[in-house]
Amino acid sequence: MSNLWDLSHLQPVSGSVLDGDNIAAMFWNAVQKRGPQVWLREKDLGIWKSWTWNQVGEAVGEIAGGLMALGFAPGQCASILSNTNARWVLADLAVLSCGGVANGIYPTDAAPQVHYLCEDSGTRVLFVEDDEQLDKALEVRAQLPLLQKIVVFDMEGLRELKDQDVLSLQALRALGRDWNAANPGALQQRIAAVRPEDVAILVYTSGTTGKPKGAMHTHAALAYTVRGNNTLVARTESDEAMCFLPLCHIAERMGGEYFALYTGCKLNFVENPDTVPENVREIAPTVFTAVPRVWEKFYSGVTISLKESSRMQQAVYAWAIGVGMKIAERVLAGQPVGAGLRAQFQLARWLVIDNVRKMIGIHRARFLVTGAAPIAPDLIKWYLALGVPMLEVWGMTETCGASTGMRPERIKLGSIGPQTNFNQVRLDPETSEIQVKGPNVFKGYLNLPDKTAETFTDDGWLRTGDVGTVDQDGYFRITDRMKDIIITAGGKNVTPSEIENELKFSPYITDAVVIGDKRPYLTVIIMIDQENVEKYAQDHDVPFSNYASLTRAPEVQQLIQDVIDEVNKKFARVEQIKKFFLLDTQLTAEDEELTPTMKLKRKLVQTKYALQIEAMYRQG
């Protein structure tokens, strides 16, 4: 086990560990190099199943052959609508091996979102996980003239399905075996024809307004970035990682799948999003990347268990974590840890801390990585006190993942670290916006040349929308966001204007402000339409004496809840409103909360009604 004052095991690797100028070539080189070694592990009916590199290569080759048999051409798009699992990776690598473009769709997305993403990307083949995801695809299939086939990973409950345009993954693999046998060398020709400058993947990001935008990443950018990631904190073939974040998100695609492909790190898949705490204890990853919400849940679990323990156990924990905190403070201050404190920590580990680490599942972890949303500095310090360094990284979809990263030899709380050595980061001298430049930056937004142009400065730097500062050591801090995009505690980007506009479609709602940045779920502050709600109350014999009593009436509260329920159906679960608060003051244009055009001022409302907002999260 590592001690946080010994960071020799966290040294970066600058040399390349795997050849290939594109992801397809890199993958097949890895198969040739590591053939009998285990790469993927997944639980099947309660038993962990291992996939060697050779077995993954066989499956990918068959799926790729099946796609070619269906007429899938280089440059065409295939989308994957599934939870994170091994078959997601197989489909992704098969599409790339064919010279195609792979696009991921969140499994929580509703049918209208699936339609938009497939239509915008020009999806020809859609991989879906099971009958639930298939239902969404079938609902919108008639509106997707380019969609040729739907491939289902899990056919349970679909044995009787008779649809010429729907086939199982096993059937596609069988088709691929026959195709490959009849067309020897065809797949190798496709792989050899993939060019570094070709678009490899689409990653749809919410952006700040309007519909999701498909960020195009080339093979060259992906290959360059995974090599760059190894210069942050290196992984090796002896490492084990856990794959559980959505693979359609840039964090897991790059930091999970492609980084493991490059380094040979074993990739372990969780059973489902609900079994993460159980699976992490089974897997005990040596390297662990997650979003702040996961780290918060682990900490909460320990805190709750502590409250249920005896006074003696609580006292011993308090002493042990106190020793760890003293060490963390010295490490953060760049000071040496004395022999006496080291000895105390060894005892603290034996008494408490090792059990806490095992309870979480981080007892083998060399380091932890957090990103995709801001994290509380005190939480990083707590993990440091357990003896496991936590390194914060910052980036975005358009930068192909991390652009800054905390250095293990110098951790600064509240900072996102200095720029990585594979890209440049600067502050705009006028706005203090953080801007990025490098070969890792995306090619542009699919079908949106104007939006692409807006995203770059005249001298070619990517506008990130984050405002920050940088200290004399080159460590950046984020202080604000230039636009109103929400990043939840789980790392999901949400565009509030889309949800707010849907809510304002209701005759009973004049305006709405969605809350959720750095929060576990979304809530909303609503200004009702006085005239229409008063009429509703009169028509339904709802008693009220004034505006405030009208907003508090149970029947009115239910009326708004019904509106929210209907709007929620149009959005993914992470984009759904969980709680709401009705402004109980009748606002006019003279009130500071409203603009001259009677629109609520987002920042002012969030500040003025901070207590009500906090109450919605305490209740949750």
Image: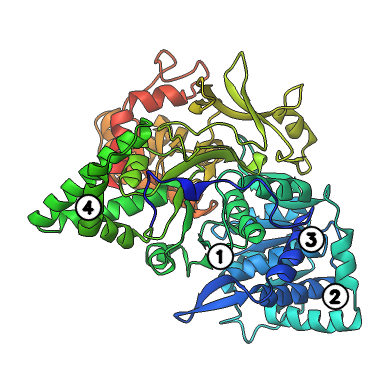
Q: Residues within 10 Å of mark 1 (few under 14, many from 20)?
A: many
The residue beneath circle 2 is 69
Residue 289, x across and y down, in percent: 49, 52
Label 2 is placed on what type of residue? Answer: Ala
Marked residue nearer the N-terminal end (1 or 4)? 1
Q: Nearer the viewer, mark 1 or mark 4?
A: 4
Residue 361, x across and y down, in percent: 37, 61
Marked residue nearer the N-terminal end (2 or 1)? 2
Give the vertical position of 260 relative to 199 (above or below): below
In this rendered view, identify the residue nearer to me: 302 or 607. 302
Q: Quadrant of residue 142?
A: bottom right
Q: Nearer the viewer, mark 2 or mark 3?
A: 3
Q: Nearer the viewer, mark 2 or mark 1?
A: 1
CA separation in Å, label 3 and label 1: 19 Å
Q: Is residue 514 visible?
A: yes
Label 4 is placed on what type of residue? Answer: Ala
CA separation in Å, label 2 and label 3: 21 Å
The label on residue 348 is 4
- State the residue lying farthest toward the left: 311
Query: Pointers 4 and 2 in contact (CB under 8 A)?
Result: no
Marked residue nearer the N-terminal end (4 or 2)? 2
The label on residue 267 is 1
The residue beneath circle 3 is 25
In the structure shown, which secondary structural element does the residue marked by tag 2 occupy?
A: helix
CA separation in Å, label 4 and label 2: 61 Å
CA separation in Å, label 1 and label 4: 32 Å
In this rendered view, identify the residue nearer to me: 205 or 419. 419
CA separation in Å, label 4 and label 3: 48 Å
